């Protein structure tokens, strides 16, 4: 591993982790990929290679699914009591907390996210999600139904039992790797499923560290199997595998549709967390002291590589000039740089491809006649850096207003009138429906907007994703099903009705 470039700001512990040999975790073994192929892992802020991991393929996925199946059918896992399962999850959460600094540095150096906000709370957030779902293990209960006796001396008993669906395949994206992994693993383990996890090809490192901690926590072999690899190979093989009972995917709507098609082979259960084009609606009575920094902070959070990014900002015409001026001033003050620098607000985009994609939207915004009021330039330095950009004078038919960009390009447009119908129509004019927010002091107006927005989550004077205790997911083409909260557990459970004459 001598060819790896030193990353001077990293702790010795993180450097040792990066340089250690990374393997696939299948059953209780750390293995090379069957093909012998590997993937180089890069720091998006330097474009330097930081680690090498095996590139799992169809055969590795098959082996991992067999391991998960064995663990589910014959292993000790399903015989463990719910309290023991909870204890294991709590132990894992403690280990995640104990390794918080290591996780933070890995997330920052692998994904490019700034330490703050982003990397610094990655571990504590993941630990909280695991603890939340550990609490559910002992609260998965069935029902008893009243029933008339079928005959004078016979009683009829009808009960339900909630059982785990079995082997769960989980495909994790790159934009918040550890948090997304915890969001998927938590409910699966709480329900008693076994798991084959495919981290993103670009950001597998935090999942591989988590695998080491899963072993250390004492989970039985085969309960969690981790196979990094390319989406088109390992991901597609997992989604299509005939012995996987459930697949959970987070990523683009386009790939989500492919997952649905291949999952049909054995009619596995599917949940999808997909793209978004979330509106952020500002009425004239909103507190602009809060609105302006929040629009900038949430709009450019993780370089806008987050599914609930408020990429369509609608501001009432009475305050639009003040909001635009304020946003431009705040945006120009953001410090762009490597995430490890504590001063950094805006890190690099994940890949050269993602940077190119964001640039193509800058070009299309200009070509379609929107006005670029700040940012948009690529920085002349190593790393996939660009200045966060804001377009104004946009129209609803422009690509920058319609498509998910997943890069730091926001559009601001004004609306008119005292009612809410026109702005609701604009906000809902999208194939997506993940998140939204409305900013006003008028609670009745806020609630009416919240009721009418077609999105899985609406913030009133707040934007983002609430804690793991509440369900999160998409309307329309933003997904199927929910993650987080009690609803997030449901897709990992199935109901068996048992009835008896006694
Ligand atoms: P993507 O292509 O949807 O990839 C997401 C995950 O799915 C990755 O782990 C990917 O693996 C895997 N994958 C790709 N093709 C697959 C297939 N045929 N079968 C199974 N798994 C497959 O997303 P992306 O290329 O990383 O980003 C493109 C766009 O997707 C972004 O610009 C953004 O619009 C959207 N996106 C949304 C979210 C979200 O949180 N909703 C997250 C990420 C991306 P590999 O990376 O190994 O190919
Ligand atoms: Mg892709």
Image: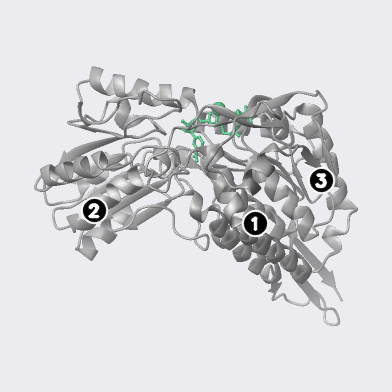
Q: CA distance from mark 3 to mark 1?
A: 16 Å
Along the line of sight, which residue is nearer the eye, 429 or 501? 429
Q: Is residue 286 above or below residue 381?
A: below
Residue 75 appears in which quarter of the rendering?
A: bottom right
**Which numbered tag is attached to residue 291?**
2
Measured in 3D between alpha carbons, the distance from the residue under mark 1 to the one under mark 2, in whole angstroms, is 34 Å
Q: Is residue 62 above or below residue 17?
A: above
Residue farthest bottom in this picture: 153
Q: Ligand 1, what quadrant?
A: top right
Q: Quadrant of the C terminus?
A: bottom right
Position of 17 with respect to 466 (left or right) is: right
Dot 1 or dot 2: first in sequence order is 1
Residue indicated by mark 1: 187
Identified at 50% across, 57% down, the residue is 471
Position of the N terminus, as image quadrant, is: top right
What label sits on residue 68 in the rendered view?
A: 3
Q: Disc 1 beta carbon < 8 A from ligand 1?
A: no
- State the SS at label 1: helix
Give the vertical position of 211 relative to 142 (above or below). Answer: above
Determine the residue located farthest toward the right in the rendered image: 74
Residue, x 33% and y 39% (percent of image)? 311
What is the crowding at mark 3: few (fewer than 14 residues within 10 Å), some, or many (at least 20)?
many
Foreground disc of the pair 3, 2? 2
Residue 418 appears left or right of 27:
left
Sort mark 2 into few (<14), some (14-19) or many (20+) by Cα contacts within 10 Å. many
Q: Looking at the image, which is closer to me, 376 or 371? A: 376
* SS at badge 3: helix
Give whichever of discs 3 and 1 has the lower sequence position. 3
Q: How far apart are the alpha carbons under marks 3 and 2?
A: 47 Å
The x and y percentages for residue 73 are 87, 51
- Is tag 3's residue or tag 2's residue first in the polypeptide sequence? 3
Left or right, residue 381 beside residue 421: right
């Amino acid at each position: 591993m001598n060819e790896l470039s030193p990353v001077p700001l990293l702790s010795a512990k993180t450097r040792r982790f990066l340089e250690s040999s990374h393997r696939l975790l299948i059953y209780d073994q750390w293995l090379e990929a069957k093909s012998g192929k590997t993937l180089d892992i890069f720091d998006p802020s330097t474009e330097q290679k930081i680690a090498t991991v095996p590139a799992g393929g169809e055969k590795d996925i098959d082996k991992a699914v067999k391991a998960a199946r064995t663990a589910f059918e014959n292993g000790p896992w399903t015989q463990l009591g719910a309290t023991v399962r909870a204890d294991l999850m709590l132990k894992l959460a403690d280990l995640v907390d104990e390794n918080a600094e290591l996780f933070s540095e890995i997330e920052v150096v692998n994904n490019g996210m700034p330490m703050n906000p982003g990397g610094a709370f990655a571990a504590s957030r993941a630990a909280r999600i695991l603890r939340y779902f550990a609490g559910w293990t002992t609260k998965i209960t069935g029902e008893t139904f009243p029933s008339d006796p079928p005959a004078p001396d016979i009683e009829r008993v009808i009960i339900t039992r909630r059982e785990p669906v079995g082997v769960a395949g989980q495909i994790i994206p790159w934009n918040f790797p550890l948090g997304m992994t915890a969001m998927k693993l938590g409910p699966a383990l709480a329900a008693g499923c076994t798991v084959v996890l495919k981290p993103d090809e670009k950001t597998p490192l935090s999942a591989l560290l988590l695998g080491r901690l899963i072993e250390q926590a004492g989970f039985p072999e085969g309960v969690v199997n981790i196979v990094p690899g390319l989406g088109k190979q390992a991901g597609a093989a997992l989604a299509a595998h005939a012995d996987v009972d459930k697949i959970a995917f987070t990523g683009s709507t386009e790939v989500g549709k492919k997952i649905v098609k291949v999952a049909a082979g054995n009619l596995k259960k599917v949940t999808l967390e997909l793209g978004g084009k979330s509106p952020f609606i500002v009425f004239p009575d909103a507190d602009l002291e809060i609105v302006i920094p929040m629009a900038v902070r949430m709009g450019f959070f993780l370089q806008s590589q987050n599914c609930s990014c408020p990429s369509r900002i609608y501001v009432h015409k009475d305050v639009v000039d003040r909001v635009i001026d304020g946003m431009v001033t705040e945006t120009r003050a953001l410090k762009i740089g490597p995430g490890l620098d504590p001063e950094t607000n805006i890190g690099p985009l994940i890949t050269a491809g993602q940077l190119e994609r964001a640039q193509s939207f800058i070009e299309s915004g200009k070509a379609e006649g929107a006005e670029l009021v700040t940012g948009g330039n690529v920085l002349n330095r190593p790393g996939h850096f660009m200045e966060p950009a804001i377009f104004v004078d946009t129209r609803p038919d422009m690509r920058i207003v319609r498509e998910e960009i997943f890069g730091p390009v926001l559009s601001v447009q004004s609306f008119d009138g005292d009612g809410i119908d026109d702005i609701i129509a604009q906000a809902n004019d999208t194939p997506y429906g993940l998140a939204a927010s409305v900013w006003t002091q008028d609670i009745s107006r806020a609630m009416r907007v919240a009721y009418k927005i077609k999105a899985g989550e609406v913030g009133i004077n707040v934007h983002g994703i609430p804690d793991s205790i509440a369900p999160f997911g998409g309307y329309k083409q933003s997904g199927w099903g929910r993650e987080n909260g009690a609803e997030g557990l449901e897709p990992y459970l199935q109901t068996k009705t048992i009835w008896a004459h006694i």
